[in-house]
Structure formats: C-alpha cells, structure tokens
Image (spheres, rainbow, N blue to C red):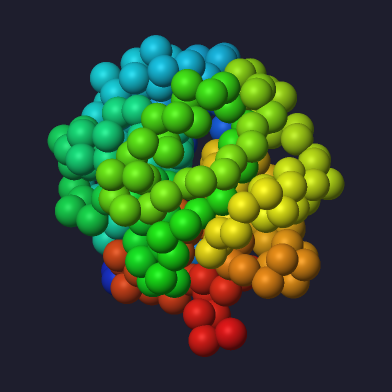
Amino acid sequence: MDALPYDLIPPPTALGLVVLQSDESVEDDMRRLLPPEASLLVSRVPSGAEVTPETLAAMERHLSGAAALFPQGKRFAAMGYGCTSGAAQIGPARVAARLRAGADVTRVTDPVTALIAACAALGVTRLGLVSPYLAEVSGRLRAVLGAQGIATPVFVSFDVPEESRVVRISPHSLMVAAQDVARRTPVQALFLSCTNLRTLEVIDPLEEALGIPVLSSNLVLGWHMAQLAGVAARGPGRLFRPEG
C-alpha cells in the first residue's frame, strides 16, 4: 500500500502552564485571558491539601518533572507556574530554573513575577492585599514584594489553609474583603492573591466601586505570559486598558 501524501501546518504559538494538583480555577481563567490562536498546554505538580511554608517549598522538587511531561521537542514561547504563594516561598528565580530544566523555554513567569511587572506598568508602589491563607504564608509574599519596592501597608486574610475551601470562596466574600482593605488605608491598587480564587468576575465591579486598579493572581499571570510570548491577551480591569 502506498503512503498517502499529506501537508504539515506550522505550529501555533505554544504557552505552557504548570498548575497545582489541587487548583480548580487557573486553567479556566487562562483560557479566558489568553488568545484562542495560542496553544495552551497544561501540566500539574503534586501539592499538599493544606497550604503551609513546608508544603509550598516541597513543590520545588517536582517542578522539573512536571515540565518534562510536556510533549517532547515542544518549543514554548512562554511558561507560567500557577502558584502565588509557592513562587514567593521557593523564589521566582528557582522556579524558572526548575521549569527550564524540564522543558524548552526561556521566558518563564509566575504570579509574583507577573504582579511585580504589572505594578511597574501601572506605576503602583502601595498595594492592598487580600489573601486566603495563614499569616505566615501571606507574610512571605509581602516580604518578597517589599524587597521589590512594593509596600503592602494593609492586608486581610480569610485564614483558610485548605485548598479545597479556597476555591469555594464566593465572589461576594471577595468583594467585601477588597472593599474593607480599600477603606482601611489609601493604596494605589488592590491584589487578590491565589490562583485558586475565582476573581475575574469581580475585577470590573471592584474597580468601578473603588476607583483604583484591581489585580489578581490569574489576571496578572495571563497578562504577563501573553506579553512574554508576544501575543495579545484580553481581560477585565485597567491592566488590560491602562489608558482608561
């Protein structure tokens, strides 16, 4: 039997995303934020049922293996690690090195790196923080941001250690918490921390109510991945329309 002739089409722009085993939100949000013509491939990394400095640090040893599960020979325009507190605990440079060790990619980001880039784009140096996690986990993120010249003079937390509960936190609860932060101390923007929080639906209502930019882990991660890959992202909030 003769082999049938065939043509090859050029590959689309490939974006990689390494997410936590326990995360139920970030994949849906990235597919909403990133352009449909880009190909988003996702791998997962083992994560603990509770979020503690120890479980966050333990993820580091699995990052290269998770990246290595992407298709062999695939060249990625950009790759993201979908964990805010994990990036703060492990360190963005170490996260990037681990992902590069497992996949063919040079441009790597995470929600902390992306947040710092977003703050620079918006001229923000005073940030209100809403976190779902325990104080020691939130404190690490605040320290990392402070070292980059981004003060977090006010923050509130739901003090929830279990990832299975974080994803169930309602949009109404996020709205109330964000408004509480904005009332306490003048800040230039708000940040809703955690890729497992469902935040995209509250960005525009909060910005309208508060008059300042509102950012979230998934919002800044999608924005920064698109920037690094040279593709056009779309989403809610002033980050996607800085002239507004």
Query: Whole-percent x and y of residue 8?
Result: 29, 69
> Relative to the observer, which residue lies in front, 119 or 188?
188
Residue 106 shown left or right of residue 117 in the figure? left
Q: How many marks?
A: 0
| Depth order, front residue of 32/144 | 144
Q: Quadrant for the N terminus, please.
A: bottom left
Q: Position of residue 125 (x, y in %)?
A: 41, 60
Vertical side of 52 occupied by 40: above or below: below
Asked whether residue 149 is in view, the answer is yes
**Residue nearest the observer in this picture, 210 or 202:** 210
Q: Where is the C terminus found, in terms of image quarters?
A: bottom right
- Name which quarter of the figure residue 81 lies in: top left
Residue at (42%, 38%) from the top-left corner? Answer: 142
Most distant residue in the right direction: 172
Residue 73 in the image: above or below residue 98? below
Location of residue 225 with respect to 148 vertically, above or below = below
- Is residue 102 at least partly visible in the picture? no
Residue at 39%, 13% (x, y): give it: 54
Q: Is residue 99 left or right of residue 162?
A: left
- Between 234 and 8, the residue placed more toward the observer is 234
> What residue is shown at x 64% (from left), y 32% (from top)?
157
The x and y percentages for residue 50 are 56, 15
**Residue at horizontal 36 percent and vertical 36 percent from the top:** 143
Residue located farthest toward the front when viewing the structure as drawn: 185
Task: Answer with left or right where residue 53 lies relative to residue 194.
Answer: left
In percent of width and height, residue 208 lies at 74, 71
